[in-house]
Each structure stands twice: as C-alpha cells, then as structure tokens.
Image: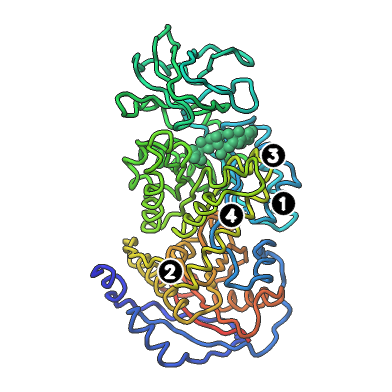
C-alpha cells in the first residue's frame, strides 16, 4: 500500500502543456475547481483540464483514412458507450468455419482475432483462410487480427482412423507404436514422436488427454510399448499423451527444441502472409521468446506480436521472465491440464491473469470454455460459470478452440462468450466489484514514467467523473495498453495511423482500435476524430470525453520534448 501511494502521489512531474496549433472550432473553459483541484492534488503533475464546446461547424470531415470497424460501430450505436464489450474474443479457425460466409458471420458476431493452429491442415489451407480474413477486413470494414499458433513438440496420438473417439476397455492390452500406417489397427495407437519410449520404464503410466484414460506400461518392445488399460475411457484422434512415474510427471519434451524446423517454416509463412500474432507452443524459457522476437525484428518490417503459451510445467517455472519478454500470453489450459493436476488450473489461471495485469501484458484464457457446444447448441451451466469467472478476472481475451474450429455451433458459442462476458462486465461495474489491484510502476525512464502516471490518473479521473469514453492518440498502442491495464469503466478509443499497431491492440481489454491519419497538431486530431465520429452518429452532443494526448512534438519545437496531457471535453 505504501508503495502504491508512493507511485501515485510522489512524482512532481510537470507534463508540458498541451499545444494547439489550430485556429480552433473549440472554445476552452476551465473545469469546476473541485475537479481540477482534486486531479492536480492527487496526480502530482499538472493536468490542463478543460471543457470544450464546439462552436462552429467546420468543413465536412473527410472519411479517407478513417477506419472504425463496423462491429464496434454498430455495437456502440445499439448499446451506447457503456454497452461496448471489453473482453476480446479469439476464435480458432478450422474446417467448420473456414469459408468466407462463416468467417464473416464470426466477424459480425464479435471475433477480434482469428487463430490458426499450424498443427492442423496444410499451409495452402491456412493461406486461403488468412487471405479471406484480410479481404473481409478490407471490403467489409472488419478489424480481425490474425494469429498463427505453432505446432510445437508435443506428444500425441496420430489420428486413429476413426473420426470420433474409440473406447479403451478396462484391462485391454494396447500397442503404442511409432510405426506409420494408414487407417486403424485393432488395439494399436500410433504415436507422433520417434523417441517417445526412450526414457519410459516398465510400470510407468501413460495418461491420455489429462485423464480421459490411463494405461500401465507392461513391456518395452524395441521402440514400442505394450500397455494395459488401467482406467478405461475414450481415445480421441490426436489425443495428448503424458508419462507418469510414482505420481510425478516424466518430462519427455525437454530435449526437443521449442521451435522445430516445421515451426520455423510456419513462422516464415506467417511473416510472408503478414500475420499480426505468433503464439508459441510449449515455451520453456525466456530465450524461446527473445530469440523469436529478435529474429522477427530482422525479418519483418511489421511488428508481429509474440504470445507465449503457458502450457507446461517448465513454462510455469520460468513464467515471470517469459511474460516480461513476450507481448502477451495464452493460458493454454488444454495442455496445462495434461501436465498439472486439474484442480490447480483455476488458481494458475487466476495467478497468470494477475501477473499479466501487473506486467501490462494481455492474457488470453483458452480451451474448453464451452466444450459441450462442439456438439450441443447450448452450454452447460458450469461452462457459463467458467466463462464468467474469466471475465470477472478481467482477462483480456477468451478463446474458442474446437467450438469454432470443428463444432456445429460456432456462432452460438461466440454469442455465449459475448453475453456471459458482457453480463459480468456490467455487473462488476454496477456493483462496483472490480478488484482494485495495486499496479507497480513499470517504466524506468522519466518519459515512460510520465506516460504511465498520466494513464493511471486518466483512468481514475474517467471513473470518478463518469465520462462516456476515453480517446487516446497513440503511435504504437503503448498508451492504450497502459490505460487498459487500469481497466477503466468507459471504453478506450485508440486512434493510430499505423494499421499494424491497430491490429496489435485487438487483444487489449476495453480498447477499440481505430485508424486515423494522425497529425502533429493534437488539437486537430481531436477535432477531426470527434467530427468523424459525430458524422457517423457514434458521438453525440453532451458526451463527455476524457482525452489523453501523447504527442511527440519534437518537430514543432527547437528542443525535443514530449507533450502529454489529459483533458476532459464535452461535445456540443
Ligand atoms: N486447421 C484445422 N484443420 C482441421 N482441424 C482443425 C484445425 N484447427 C483446429 N482443428 C480441430 O479443432 C480442434 C481444436 O483445435 P485446437 O484448439 O487447435 O486444439 P488442439 O490442440 O486439440 O489441436 C482440434 O482438435 C482439431 O480437431
Ligand atoms: C490452446 C491450447 O493449445 P493447443 O490447442 O495447441 O493444444 C491448449 O493446450 O489449451
């Protein structure tokens, strides 16, 4: 608490006053003293707060270069500022939703990011999907980000020839083999990883998909294993395998690189197709992330965000460094549940969402959120409770896996995510139940500290004043992420002139990314964007907007400087 007070009250930073070069159509008025005064006292730096009233109608603003995605725009018109969903939604694209019409329906249903698991299907198939999404973005006005997810070195069964599951009966004897064959053989399981039996001992247990079925190794036959089913259950195609000895996990993947030759080829493919995110499977330590990031910086002029999938014991051991180095994480509960007892997954999820808030990294909660909807048109009560819990933890994003990739109810599943997360957001806000987290200061340099403090204070002001929206003008999305970290009540409209940065904000809680040709004159940026939003009927007279300016005005003055300010404006 003492540290919290220090970071909020101590710095006597004087942010340079906002510079307006426009012959403004706005006229400034001081805020009532109480508001102005309280901000100054609490923030410890000078904020020029002003009420601005639009007085004259400037020339009709051009819409050229202004990109406001059709889904957020429609949602805003329908539900108002406070009705905008804050939690972002990721859908895994598979055979059930890869056509243009299905993808468009998911886009209209609220998909913010499309995830492609490179472990399935051909590159040609993935290319077609990516191009369809990009075409939809361009032609229909969506803002869907594209994520590829590396296959990684995981041990699983090779499709057993049956489309659904096969049953393993109690006491039945099975052969786990590396021999490759088409279709199925009775009581035989093909394993994808050549060296899978090397460190296995007779007596070890093989657990399928974290507990769907269990086998005991009764004999090693060269590179294969003969096993007896000790806990009967279902074997799904590509079910994941884990090995246990005396109740402890035998870590089999340690010798394998995090990124295989195929993964690197998939990454090259992702770069050439201009994807926005790369999710890395089975991250072990920080080097996996730093190596990929430095590689990407030499290979791509676009900033591709690297997300670490936390899905193994090893990644948990090194989690803080991994989160710091990455651009976000995925709590990959599917594979995590193969290595970690299931009852520990909820607390791990809670701790990871907390850690990501602390470190200002977006977090996706993934896997089995609405698993029953792969088959059924309604979710179970328990699934809705799980989705709501993740939204209550204020995770940045929720993800559909099989529900959208192979399920028959992809759109319905997406609408359940929308409704359950929206309901939880509303309840938390109205009941004032948001957890007020202590957020440690992250920035090291003075300009960065100013940005961070501005954003912390801006959110406090926005909540206290009950403003309708926060507008932020941002080059790379950093200020938007700092605002989002504080989980404000109003939505954050983040204007950037960089299409790549816009998609990069798609995973940030509460941020609506817009593209707009920013000028150095911040007053013009505000005037233009408000006019454009008014023209489209999304901003109305009387709306109170808190504006965060972050302008590098070095080109406007002899002395390089950064001008940052918070203003409160009422649209006339
Ligand atoms: N591109 C694809 N082609 C075919 N099937 C896919 C594809 N992507 C996902 N799937 C199917 O959807 C299921 C869920 O996908 P995913 O979330 O990637 O999980 P998994 O780790 O089980 O592969 C997969 O088991 C697979 O059956
Ligand atoms: C999302 C996950 O990863 P994958 O689908 O690659 O298994 C998971 O394991 O939860």
Q: Give the foreground label among 1 and 2.
A: 2
Mark 4 and mark 1 in contact (Cβ < 8 Å)? no
Is the shortest distance between ligand 1 and the CB of mark 4 under 8 Å?
Answer: no
In the image, which disc is placed on residue 96? Answer: 3
Which comes sooner in the sequence, label 3 or label 4?
A: 3
Mark 4 Cα within 10 Å, few/some/many (few <14, many 20+)?
Answer: many
- Residue 111 horizontal side relative to residue 208, left or right: right
Q: Give the foreground label among 2 and 3.
A: 2
Circle 4 — which element? helix
Q: Which residue is depicted at the point 43% across and 26% down?
A: 207
Is the shortest distance between ligand 1 and the CB of mark 1 under 8 Å?
Answer: no
For mark 1, what is the residue? 105
Mark 2 Cα within 10 Å, few/some/many (few <14, many 20+)?
Answer: few
Q: Quadrant of residue 244?
A: top left
Q: Quadrant of residue 436?
A: bottom left
Q: Give the foreground label among 3 and 4.
A: 4
x, y percentage for residue 1? 26, 69
The Cα atoms of the two marked residues, 4 and 2, are separated by 20 Å
Residue at the farthest top position: 222
The Cα atoms of the two marked residues, 2 and 3, are separated by 38 Å
For mark 2, what is the residue? 433
Mark 2 and mark 4 in contact (Cβ < 8 Å)? no
Residue at the farthest front position: 170
- Residue 78 horizontal side relative to residue 198, left or right: right
x, y percentage for residue 119? 56, 31
Q: Give the foreground label among 1 and 4.
A: 4
Q: Nearest the camera: 141 or 269?
A: 141
Circle 1 — which element? helix
For mark 4, what is the residue? 417
In the image, which disc is placed on residue 410? Answer: none
x, y percentage for residue 122? 64, 30
């Amino acid at each position: 608490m003492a540290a919290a007070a220090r970071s909020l009250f101590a710095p006597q930073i004087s942010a340079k006053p906002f510079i307006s070069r426009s012959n403004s159509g706005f006229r400034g008025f001081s805020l009532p003293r109480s508001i102005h005064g309280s901000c100054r006292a609490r923030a410890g730096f000078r904020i020029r707060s002003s009420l601005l009233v639009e007085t004259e109608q400037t020339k009709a603003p051009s819409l050229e270069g202004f990109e406001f995605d059709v889904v957020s725009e429609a949602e805003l018109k329908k539900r108002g500022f406070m009705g905008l969903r804050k939690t972002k939604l990721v859908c895994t694209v598979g055979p059930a939703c890869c056509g243009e019409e299905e993808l468009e329906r998911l886009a209209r249903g609220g998909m913010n990011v499309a995830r492609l698991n490179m472990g399935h299907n051909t590159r040609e198939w993935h290319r077609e999907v990516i191009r369809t999404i990009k075409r939809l973005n361009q032609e229909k006005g969506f803002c869907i980000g594209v994520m590829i997810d590396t296959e990684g070195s995981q041990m699983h069964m090779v499709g057993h020839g049956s489309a659904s599951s096969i049953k393993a009966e109690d006491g039945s004897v099975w052969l786990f083999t590396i021999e490759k064959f088409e279709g199925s053989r009775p009581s035989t399981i093909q394993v994808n990883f050549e060296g899978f039996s090397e460190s296995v001992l007779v007596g070890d247990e093989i657990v399928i998909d974290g507990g769907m079925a269990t086998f005991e190794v009764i004999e090693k036959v060269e590179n294969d294993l003969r096993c007896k089913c000790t806990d009967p259950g279902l074997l799904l195609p590509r079910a994941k395998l884990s090995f246990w000895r005396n109740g402890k996990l035998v870590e089999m993947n340690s010798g394998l690189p995090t990124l295989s030759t195929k993964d690197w080829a998939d990454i090259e493919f992702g770069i050439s197709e201009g994807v926005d995110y790369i999710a890395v499977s089975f991250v072990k330590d920080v080097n996996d992330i730093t190596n990929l990031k430095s590689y990407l910086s030499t290979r791509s002029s676009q900033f591709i965000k690297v997300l670490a999938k936390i899905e193994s014991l090893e990644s948990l051991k090194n989690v803080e460094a991994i989160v710091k180095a990455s651009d976000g994480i995925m709590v990959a509960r599917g594979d995590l549940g193969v290595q970690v007892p299931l009852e520990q997954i909820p607390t791990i999820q809670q701790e990871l969402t907390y850690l990501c808030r602390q470190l200002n990294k977006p977090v996706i909660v993934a896997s089995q959120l609405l698993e029953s909807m792969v088959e059924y048109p309604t979710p179970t009560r328990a699934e809705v409770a799980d989705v709501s819990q993740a939204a209550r933890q204020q995770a940045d994003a929720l993800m559909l896996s099989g529900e959208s990739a192979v399920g028959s109810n992809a759109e319905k599943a997406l609408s359940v995510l929308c409704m359950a997360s929206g309901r939880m957001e509303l309840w938390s806000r109205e009941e004032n139940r948001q957890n007020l987290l202590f957020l440690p200061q992250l920035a090291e340099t003075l300009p960065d500290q100013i940005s961070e403090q501005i954003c912390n204070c801006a959110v406090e002001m926005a909540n206290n004043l009950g403003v309708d929206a926060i507008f932020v003008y941002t080059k790379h999305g950093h200020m938007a992420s700092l605002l989002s970290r504080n989980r404000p009540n109003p939505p954050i409209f983040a204007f950037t002139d960089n299409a790549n940065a816009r998609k990069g904000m798609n995973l940030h809680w509460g941020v609506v990314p817009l593209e707009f040709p920013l000028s150095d004159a911040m007053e013009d940026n505000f005037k233009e964007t408000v006019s454009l939003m008014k023209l489209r009927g999304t901003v109305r007279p009387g709306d109170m907007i808190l504006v965060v300016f972050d302008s590098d005005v070095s080109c406007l003055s002899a002395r390089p400087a950064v001008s940052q300010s918070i203003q409160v404006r009422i649209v006339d």
